[in-house]
Image (cartoon, rainbow, N blue to C red):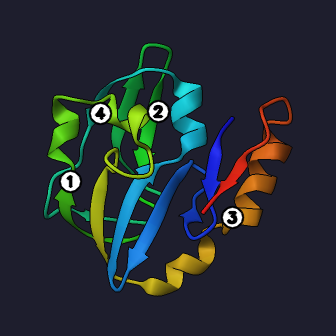
């Protein structure tokens, strides 16, 4: 079963953002990492790169599939998770902690309104993928 954290903001591309001031930490959702299977490679964007909301900025590869990595919010990448270059499986092992992808200094906080909250994301996943396990709330 996938877990969904209530305090986060989710994109339809299954990345989520945890916001602290102007800084947003971007990660792959638990739902996405479970359905991709064992992550074997993460192509990270470059620190200092400007990203736009919803635009592809990297790739996550698993033994089963490859998925484009999109930025949930626009801004400048101030840090990437260098551990993922050698230990990509952190995305699976710790999607809400050690498996973070990048940190973005947001250029437009209003874009948060375009992301889904907990209830919207659960509904989106259940309606788009009706045969999956029901997400479990995790706060």
Q: Is residue 85 above or below residue 112?
A: above
Q: Earlier in the sequence, mark 4 or mark 3?
A: 4
Q: Earlier in the sequence, mark 4 or mark 1?
A: 4
Q: Is residue 100 above or below residue 103?
A: above
Question: According to the image, label 3 marks what residue?
Answer: 118
Question: According to the image, label 2 marks what residue?
Answer: 67
Position of residue 80 measured from the top left corner of the image (x, y, whole percent): 20, 53
Position of residue 39 measured from the top left corner of the image (x, y, whole percent): 39, 25
Question: According to the image, label 1 marks what residue?
Answer: 80
Locate residue 69: give its quadrant: top left
Position of residue 71 measured from the top left corner of the image (x, y, whole percent): 41, 58
Label 4–label 1 contact, CB within 8 A: no
Q: Please give the name of the residue rendered at 28% of the width and 64% of the height, measured from the top-left corner.
A: 103
Q: Which mark identifies residue 42?
A: 4
Label 1–label 2 contact, CB within 8 A: no
- Asked whether, in this view, residue 53 is left or right of residue 14, the answer is left
Label 3–label 2 contact, CB within 8 A: no
Quick one: label 4, few (<14), some, or many (20+) residues within 10 Å?
many
Q: Which one is nearer the viewer's eye here, 6 or 84?
A: 6
């Amino acid at each position: 079963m996938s877990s969904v954290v209530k305090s986060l903001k989710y994109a339809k591309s299954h990345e989520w953002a945890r916001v602290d001031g102007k800084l947003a930490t971007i990660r792959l959702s638990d739902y996405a990492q479970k359905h991709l299977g064992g992550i074997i490679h993460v192509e990270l964007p470059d620190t200092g790169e400007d990203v736009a909301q919803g635009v592809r900025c990297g790739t996550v590869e698993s033994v089963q599939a490859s998925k484009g990595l999109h930025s949930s919010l626009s801004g400048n990448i101030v840090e990437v998770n260098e551990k993922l270059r050698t230990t990509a499986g952190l995305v699976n092992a710790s999607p809400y902690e050690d498996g973070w992808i990048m940190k973005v200094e947001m250029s437009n906080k209003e874009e948060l309104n375009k992301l889904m909250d907990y209830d919207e994301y659960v509904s989106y996943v259940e309606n788009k993928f009706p045969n999956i396990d029901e997400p479990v709330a995790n706060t």
